[in-house]
Image: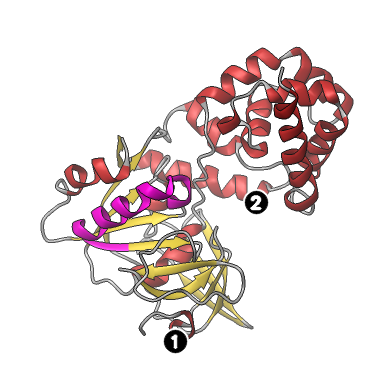
Amino acid sequence: MQQDAVEAVVDRYGRFARDEAPGRSAVYEGWARRVVDDTAVAEALARIAETRRQPPLVFAVMRLLGAPEDDVDAWAAWVVAHADQVVVECGRRSVQTNEPLRCAALLPALSLIEGPIALLEVGASAGLCLYPDRYSYRYRRGEEVIALDPADGRSPVVLECELEGHPDLRMPDVVWRAGIDLNPLDARAADDRAWLTGLVWPGEEGRRERIAGALDIATADPPLLVAGEGAAALPALAAQAPRGATLVVTTPGVLAHIPRAGRAPVIAAARAAGRWITLDAAALHDGWTHPPRIRRGGFALALDGDVRAEVDPLGAWVAWHPESTGGAQ
């Protein structure tokens, strides 16, 4: 085994233990620290392909395969004993963050578009962000709570979001839902459900419940999901959207997972198909009409390239200040 691969694992998991896991998952922090301190464990993880070696993916695979969580010594022994199985499973899996809370960040932009809406997401995973009209929202602006519910009443999935500014918020009228993913997941399939809920870090039980509830909503009314690359697959799928509906293509957080040279074609295809909503890091691409001015370290939310707000990448907060982010009001 090459020593540089082991050193890369120790470095990556050390950064994860120091910068990413604390305050979010004590289990993952303990596992990552053990990787740094235990050569046998680090060597086992170094066997995983570099592109499949990121801690959230590897740890989720281990939990899926039954790794013990309560005893870090037992966990370390399990990793060494099951290294072959972990390597194989990591090779066929990828992190597919299908966080329905992102709809709370998308909703202010969707509210600017007249319905009915045909919604198409690039990087859809199981399509949980294709149901903004099926979730309830509770936006908190100081002491004020802005509540929005589906037409038939409060949803079993309630998305809570901190809000700055005064966007006009309304429930969208979505009449068609479709998505593209390299590996679409089926909310009705037990294995896919287990994988999506297993990607939730230990200690994030509220998030796990939210994803499970969203999976139930998708199961009751499955979206149209196709396997493929965004730029190549988008035109044919967009052509299936019903006439009379405004086609809205969303790319919430997916462009970061596409090599930089491939991002511009996806953006061009989205714009050619219809309206385009995205939330991305400011420096991720050049698809903005004006460079975003980020104040809180979040992502830029844009409609057709016009930046409307700064948002939490997973939707926990929205700062709606178009005049200060570079976009038009």
Q: Start and end of the magenta stretch?
A: 254-276
In the structure shown, which secondary structural element does the residue marked by tag 1 occupy? helix
Q: What residue is at 24 percent from the left and 46 percent from the top? A: 234
Return the disc, 2 or 1, that comes first in the chain's sequence: 2
- The Cα–Cα distance between marks 2 and 1, rounded to whole angstroms, is 34 Å
Place of residue 205 in the rendered image (x, y in percent of width and height, measured from the top left) = 68, 46
Give the overall secondary structure of the magenta segment: helix
Residue extending farthest to the left is 243
Disc 2 marks which amino acid?
Answer: Gly
Between residue 310 and residue 289, name the one nearer to us.
289
Residue 133 in sight in this render: yes
Disc 1 marks which amino acid?
Answer: Glu
- Give the residue at mark 1: 323
- Give the residue at mark 2: 206
Residue 323 higher or lower than 258, as above or below? below
- Is residue 309 rendered magenta in the image? no
Place of residue 257 in the rendered image (x, y in percent of width and height, measured from the top left) = 47, 45
